Amino acid sequence: MNAPLLEVRLQLHFDPVLLAEDRLMYFFKINDESAGEIQILTDRIELGSRRGVSFPRLRSDWTRILDSFFDIFRITSLNQISLAYLNEIPLQNLRDFRDLLNLRIEMPPSLKERFEFFRTECTYNYDFGMIRVWLQPDWDEQMDAYCIQLSLEARHLGRLRTEDLFPQLQELHEGIKTVFREILSESYIRELPQ
């Protein structure tokens, strides 16, 4: 069984800066596209990866990119951090989702018989901020089968010095990992490659 992780996205917000053309060109020259997707706006930078690996394996590439970005644009503090993982879990049929999840929704028997699945959103509160969870059914055209899309986004709200970013990102990653294990069934997690 393949790991369900499709995409990792990191978004860092800061006070608006001037994006001088020469500095942007220099930044992109020293940070090649092999590191993943990079998007820069005047008040944030977004990094993305579709390699199917989580933050710890992206850390060295992202450290290099962000250290150069902070240096070139003289950014010393951040306003908000968001680390998000998009997962896709294949299903044999749509009713199989109940076997994969630890979440249970109680409903009247008449509704239960007609009900298959709907989008669910919830928030876990932590000392660092929060983790938002989105869970919804979908049809995967490539696999020609049903799947569950599971999106987990950890946010640190409030100011943070740039030198404290990577320990904070590790904490966000650990929070996401904990929620992932709480939402999905033990039997499904045991089948995943470790």
Image (cartoon, helix red, strand yellow):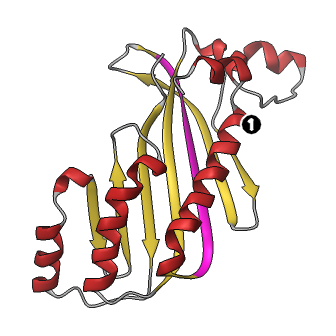
**Element carrying mark 1:** helix
Q: Nearer the viewer, residue 19 or 117?
A: 19
Q: Amino acid at mark 1?
A: Glu
57 up-or-down from 70: above or below: above
Residue at the top extreme, as displayed = 92
Is 154 magenta? The answer is yes
What percent of the width, then of the height, locates residue 58?
A: 39, 51
- Report the side of 5 relative to 154 (left or right): left
Q: In percent of the image, x 37 and y 88: which residue is there?
A: 16
Does residue 11 appear in this view?
A: yes
The residue that disc 1 covers is 182
What percent of the width, then of the height, locates residue 87?
A: 50, 35
Q: In percent of the image, x 77 and y 28: which residue is there?
A: 102
Q: Quadrant of residue 142?
A: top left
User: How many numbered marks have been drawn onto this rendered protein structure?
Assistant: 1
Q: In percent of the image, x 38 and y 75: which residue is there?
A: 44
Q: In percent of the image, x 36 and y 57: which residue is there?
A: 60
- Report the side of 141 relative to 90 (left or right): left
What percent of the width, then of the height, locates residue 26?
A: 12, 77
Is 59 magenta? The answer is no
Q: Main secondary structure of the magenta part?
A: strand
Q: Quadrant of residue 151?
A: top right
State which quarter of the image contains the C terminus. Answer: top right
Q: Quadrant of residue 134?
A: top right
181 up-or-down from 66: above or below: above
What percent of the width, then of the height, locates residue 50?
A: 33, 42
Q: Start and end of the magenta stretch?
A: 146-159
Q: Residues within 10 Å of mark 1 (few under 14, many from 20)?
A: few
- Report the side of 22 relative to 193 (left or right): left
Q: Nearer the viewer, residue 61 or 41?
A: 61
Does residue 47 appear in this view?
A: no
